[in-house]
Amino acid sequence: LPKDMVVATGNVGIRSLREYTFDINGGTYTALEALKVIDPKYVIFSMGMNDINLLSAEEYTAQYAAEIEKILTICPDSDIIVAGITPILPSSDFTSNASIQQYNAALAQTIQQLNRENVAYFDAYAVISDPASGGLAEMYSAGDGVHLGNAAYPALLNALCPLLDAMSVPPAFPALEQRLTETTAAETAISGTE
C-alpha cells in the first residue's frame, strides 16, 4: 500500500493509539485525524500483541469498541475489519497462545455485539497457526517467535479476501458495484444459469 494510506507504526496498541502521530499526505496527524484525511473505503485493524500483557480482555475490547465507534463517526461509509491477535511460537515466553485466544474470543464477541453491517472480525490467528501445536506455524515466524515473517502476509491476505468479498461494497464505490453486477450478469448469460 502507498505510505499515505497506512496509519501504522511499531509498538502501537489500542491502548496507546491516541499517543502516536502519522505522516500522511504531507501532514502529521493522530490516527483519527489521518483517517479523516484519507477517508478510506476499508479500515483494517491489526493490533493487540502490544496490549495483551498490559490490559485485561475486558479493557482491551472496551477500548477497541470505543475506537471503532469514533472511526464510524468520522468515516461512516468505511468497512472496518478487525483482525484477531496472531499466534506466537509455543516456545515464546512473551505471553501464551491460550491468553491470545481468550482475547480474540472476547474481541470477536465484541464485534458481534456491535452489530454493524460494515464491521467484521477476521480470525488471523487461525490462518497462520500450526494445527499440531496450536501456536504460530514456524514458516510464518520472523525468528523471534512473536513477529511475523514475510510468508505470513500473503497467507493473511488470501484469507482476508473472501471476507472482503462477503462485506457490502462501501457506498463510495458505486461504479465498482455496478461493474461487478454487470460482470456477474454477463457470466450468468454465458453459462446459461440464473
Image (cartoon, rainbow, N blue to C red):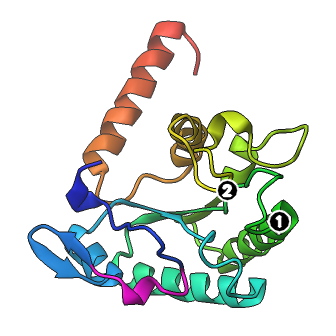
Q: Quadrant of residue 106?
A: bottom right
Residue at the (38%, 34%) spot, across then down: 180
* Residue at (66% x, 89% y) in the render: 62
Q: Residues within 10 Å of mark 2 (few under 14, many from 20)?
A: many
Residue 127 position in % (x across, y down): 70, 43
Query: Is 150 situated left or right of 97 in this image?
Result: left
The segment highlighted magenta reads 14-21
Secondary structure beneath dot 1 equals: loop
The CA span between labels 1 and 2 is 11 Å
As for residue 117 lying within the magenta part, the answer is: no
| Left or right: 111 as drawn, with respect to 193 | right
Q: Position of residue 50 (x, y in %)?
A: 59, 74
Q: Which mark is residue 142?
A: none
Displayed quadrant of residue 39: bottom left
Q: Above or below — where is 174 with respect to 12? A: above
The relative height of residue 62 versus residue 122 in the rendered view (above or below) is below
Q: Nearer the viewer, residue 151 or 118?
A: 151
* Mark 2: amino acid: Thr
Q: Residue at x 82, y 53 (%)?
A: 91
The residue sitting at the left extreme is 26
The image position of residue 23, as x and y in percent, is 20, 71
Q: Locate residue 26 relative to residue 186 in the image: left or right.
A: left
Q: Which residue is mark 1?
A: 96
Residue at 72%, 52% in the rendered image: 125
Which residue was labeled with disc 2? 86
